[in-house]
Amino acid sequence: MLETETAWIDRFLRHLGTERRLSPLTCRHYGRDIEALAGYCDRLGLERWGDLDSEHIRAFSAAIFRRGMSPRSIQRRLSAARTFFRYLLREKHVRKSPIDAINAPKAKKRLPENLDVDRMARLLQLPGDSPIVARDRAILELLYSSGLRLAELIGLNLTDIDMADGTVHVTGKGSKDRIVPVGRMARQALAEWQRQRGQLAGADEAALFVSQRGTRLSPRSVQARVDYWARRQGIDTKVYPHLFRHSFASHLLESSHDLRGVQELLGHSSISTTQVYTHLDFQHLAQIYDQTHPRAKTKTRK
């Protein structure tokens, strides 16, 4: 492929980072997938992006499938290519997209893991009252109380917590803001952490959660602390920060049956993303149906 054509990959990645404000990690994933497609073009002797047609894309998809790539990974790779070609169309560098007519292989839908209420309650009962324990208790309680993503959690500043209203201001994916309620137990844990935070953080540090060095916590540090407490509390499954979000969504949906409300709290742009949490027990669903549907039960005549 011509050097002038591969330069479009860098332009695309800058577009993702600056205009769409995607994270550096997401941009790297896009770059890796588009580079794979560029390598395929080189093997076919195609010099320009506009030379690609739908048959080339089908052959590309089949080739990576034969090499053992999972359907889910192929979906991601084709999705990246689709976004790339939409950018090229916007910039008038190509006249059509060869991806739009291509259907990726269907992947088995995996239900999110979650901790049941009892195990979650056991995990959150952290022993001790040191500043580190107070911080970790506040982190775990907030993750479960408000369903935050890891990046959202570590990005919080002191000013994002409104203890009077019981809310937290969150900046989510694509720099989208939302206001999320904070539960009673999480507010208590946050109040205790804020009382002890000055023992770790400097006066000028804006981050809500800080390390022992007094600087903003890293994602890896939070992952390590979550894993530590899960093992310490005897939780018999792998625990990671996003598991709190899954548990939050599952438990809330089981109690409220309000899919739209859970969508808003999670910050999902599409309700189809939230629907993955509707894996409720069928008997429970049948009971709800019998209780609420006007024609679920026939009244017996006397």
Image (cartoon, rainbow, N blue to C red):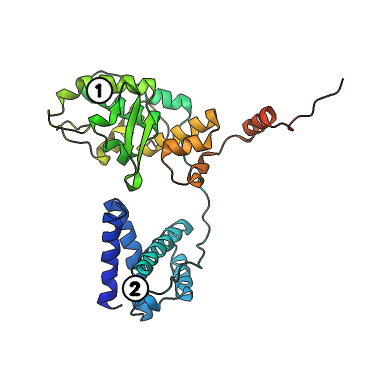
Residue 257 at x, y = what percent?
55, 32
Name the residue at 55% across, 39% down: 278
Indicate which disc residue 193 carries.
1
Along the viewing direction, whichever of 234 and 9 lies nearer the viewer: 9
Q: Left or right of 295: which side holds 242?
A: left
Residue 32 sits in quarter: bottom left
Is residue 91 visible from the viewing direction of this image? yes
Q: Which mark sits nearer the N-terminus, 2 or 1?
A: 2
Query: Which element type, helix, strand or loop, lies under badge 2?
Result: loop
Residue holding disc 2: 93
Residue 25 at x, y = what percent?
29, 52
Along the viewing direction, whichever of 94 and 229 lies nearer the viewer: 94
Query: Which element type, helix, strand or loop, lies under badge 1?
Result: helix
Residue 130 at x, y = what percent?
22, 20
Q: What residue type is labelled 1?
A: Trp
Residue 85 sits in quarter: bottom left
